[in-house]
Image (cartoon, grey):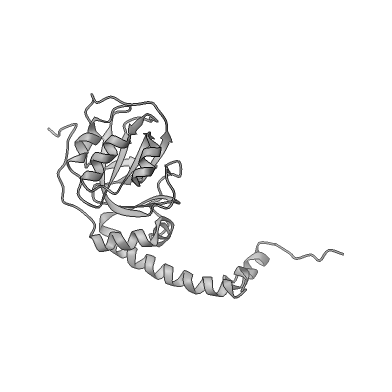
Amino acid sequence: MTARHMVVRTSKRVPADVLAGLAEAGASTVHEADGRRGAVAPQLRPIQTGARIAGSAVTVSCHPGDNLMIHAAVEQVRPGDVVVVTTTSPSTDAMLGDLLATSLRARGAIGVVLDAGVRDVADLREMGFPVWSRAVGTQGTVKASPGSVNVPIVVGGQVIRPGDAIVADDDGVVVVPHERAGQVLEAARDRIANEASKRARLTDGELGLDMYRLRPLLAELGVVYVDEP
């Protein structure tokens, strides 16, 4: 019989050089490069500005209002990982504060994505420990209920598996399946090069209407130009 609750030990990680490239590209570019897939719901917002990270997911499923399994997850963290937490029913209770963040950082975690609440945000900002969360609040949690670590979870409408690439910055959070990460990085780099060319043309004054050849589309959609008398 399969266990209902478990902590899965896994070595599945995206290579560090691929993660570095995805972080450099940023969440929005990675989302576009992966066929506009993987965007976590925008309700999960960063508590800081300017952070740009990419790491392999350590996934955590918790009972609402209970952060026991995040403590269990700390042991499974390797340097460069991003801890991704959900609850089995909707919750805005603060599942993470500065003490737990300190423990995660000591194991090498570079950030947390939390489909629940966070507190001690001033301390977390001072630590420079980035968090993306659904809520900020004072309501704390207990440590009493079982859950699971390193199992597939759903966060912000996206299925996230242990070892998937998590890319997060001021725009939000994107997940890239482990097996597609290298391919998506190549597509992201192509997109960045293409955008650099477009940016130069726009800087020189060329209109997007012409660069993207949108004038025929306007006509097809029935948009007409009228000169005011």
Is 181 placed above or below 45 here?
below
x, y percent for residue 146 = 21, 28
Q: Quadrant of the N terminus?
A: top left
Q: Is residue 147 left or right of residue 32?
A: left
x, y percent for residue 53 = 34, 54
Q: Is residue 39 left or right of residue 71?
A: right
- Count of numbered labels shown in the rendering: 0
x, y percent for residue 184 = 34, 62
x, y percent for residue 176 = 32, 54
Question: What residue appears at the point 31 percent right and 31 percent down from the top-left corner?
Answer: 88
| Relative depth, front residue between 121 and 41 | 121
- Asked where in the image residue 159 lies, by quadrant, the reply is top left
Q: Quadrant of the C terminus?
A: bottom right
Q: Is residue 92 left or right of residue 69?
A: right
Question: What residue appears at the point 36 percent right and 31 percent down from the top-left corner?
Answer: 94
**Most distant residue in the left direction:** 1
- Asked where in the image residue 44 lies, by quadrant, the reply is top left
Question: What residue appears at the point 27 percent right and 31 percent down from the top-left corner?
Answer: 67
| Relative depth, front residue between 122 and 159 | 122
**Most distant residue in the front direction:** 126
Question: What residue appears at the point 36 percent right and 62 percent down from the top-left corner?
Answer: 24
**Most distant residue in the right direction:** 229
